[in-house]
Amino acid sequence: MLTDGELRERLAGLVAEATDGEVEAAEVLAGPARLADLGVTSLGLLRLIDAVDTAFGVEVDPDAFETLDDLVRNVRAREAG
Amino acid sequence: MEGPLTWGQQDIWRAVVAAAPQEHYLNIARVFPGPRRPVTVQRAMRALDALVARHESLRTRLTGPRDAPRRLVRPTARPHVEVTSEPADLVRDRLAAEPFRYTDEWPLRVAFVVDGEHVRQVVLVLCHLAADGHAADLVVRDFRLLLIRDALPPVTAATPRELAEWQRSEEGARVSERAVAFWLEEYARMDPVPEAALVPGSPRFLEATMSSTALAAAAQAVAARHRVSSSTVLLAAAVRLAGGLTGQRHCGMRVIVNNRFAADRRDVVSTISQEGLVLLDLDVPSFGDLVRQGWTAAMRAYRQAWFDPYAMEEAVSAAGPGIRSFGCFNDQRLVQRDEPGAAAPDERSLREAAERTEVAWTDAMDRNICDFRLHLGGEPGRMEVSLYADTALLGPAGIERYLRELETLVVDAAAGGGT
């Protein structure tokens, strides 16, 4: 299993891919900002949710996360469940 | 090579059968300029051959019985091509005016609009069984590149045949069952839609189109305030007005979803858009609350729009009398981004812009699969909203009133601030 740090980096990478690089992984990792505030659109969120589903087999509710930390917690909780 | 239709193709085929012989409205037309360094017709023909060789869906016809057609893919194809000096818009309208002959015509009609030897514009009309709007844009992109290059990098996206195979796999069945289960949960919350009660006109289905700069500006302003897309704002407004017509508190509307969120489906040249279901509880204190609810509902709906249409039809048709979705919402601007940081317009300029809004009658048909369809398009700064309705459900005055009220609702919300 990935460490929390590795998981954060992996998820930040998925955010960058979901936004075609418009939001960079480094920006996502830099602080506690909401993904929407960094420029992740609804389309980006849908791509991200799909990518998380593919990579981790975890379906995250779009309502359940606003920040990278929320997303990490969600993936961990669903992995455990 | 023969195979089953994909889910997206099955959806389109149902629409074709329901509207035949007037299903030409499903055709997808594109016009684009020739390369800056002009190319000859001969060069353009080579590019077309390479395009058709590249995309399986452009070499596919239907075969078999009308109630259960199958795809027939050929290794080569030469679609209908014209070389003309007519204006491109006229050529486009002429080529798009007739339905495709699904079993003996390739799903692409092409015209090269020439000025002497050289191709100035290219007109493409695609059969909706071969492409949805996004796929049509991908075909245009490839065609433009092939006019100036001899070869393109290999296609990495799934082919229609691979999609159809996946859809018939265990995983595909699971995905479809999950979507059906989601729709049934939403249907269980829905209030009944009353029967259409008006005497239908002839032709029975009418379309009016509203052209409005006020709506474009207002939708952006409300979207920015609630941190959602303008599409969500317009969807919430559309469902609220639909509920006003039906008297439903829990009103469901179908939305066209492009189904390209997964990385391996983004660049598929095929019809993969399908319908999602957005159900809203209209008993909320303010329009702003409805917009926020709409965002969540739409995000969920977009994830559950990938399913076997016949399985879905069978499941939801047993939901009970009057329990059905009301109409279809198709925002073709969905992939566009809203302009970030656009200054919010003041109320006076919005009201003045609304004075200039125009509504025109743009289409009429005798048959259609859908009794109420809203189509959003236009260009940045000016929205075109078309409402296509069964006159047994909504008469001509009602159609125009719905469009005007959609604008008023969103303009009021933008002008009202804070709600």
Image (cartoon, rainbow, N blue to C red):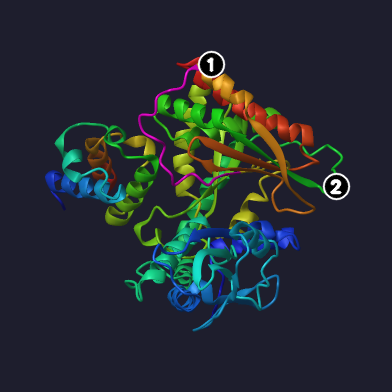
* Residue of label 2: B202
Please state the extent of the stretch shown in magenta in the rendering.
Answer: B329-346
Check residue B342 for magenta coloring. yes
Badge 2 and badge 1 in a common chain? yes
Q: What residue type is disc 1 on? A: Arg
Looking at the image, is B166 positioned above or below residue B307?
below
Q: Nearer the viewer, mark 2 or mark 1?
A: 1
Q: Using residue B292 as the reference point, say whether residue B125 is left or right of it.
A: right
**Depth check, front residue: B168 or B56:** B56
Q: Position of residue B112 (x, y in %)?
A: 55, 69
**Which circle's residue, 2 or 1, is located before the other in the chain?**
2
Residue at 64% x, 73% y: name it.
Answer: B69
Label 1 is found on which chain of the structure? B
Label 2 is found on which chain of the structure? B
* Residue of label 1: B348
Residue at 47% x, 26% y: name it.
Answer: B222
Q: Position of residue B333 (x, y in %)?
A: 49, 44
Q: Main secondary structure of the magenta part?
A: loop
Q: Using residue B237 as the reference point, say whether residue A56 is left or right of it.
A: left
Looking at the image, is B135 positioned above or below residue A3?
below
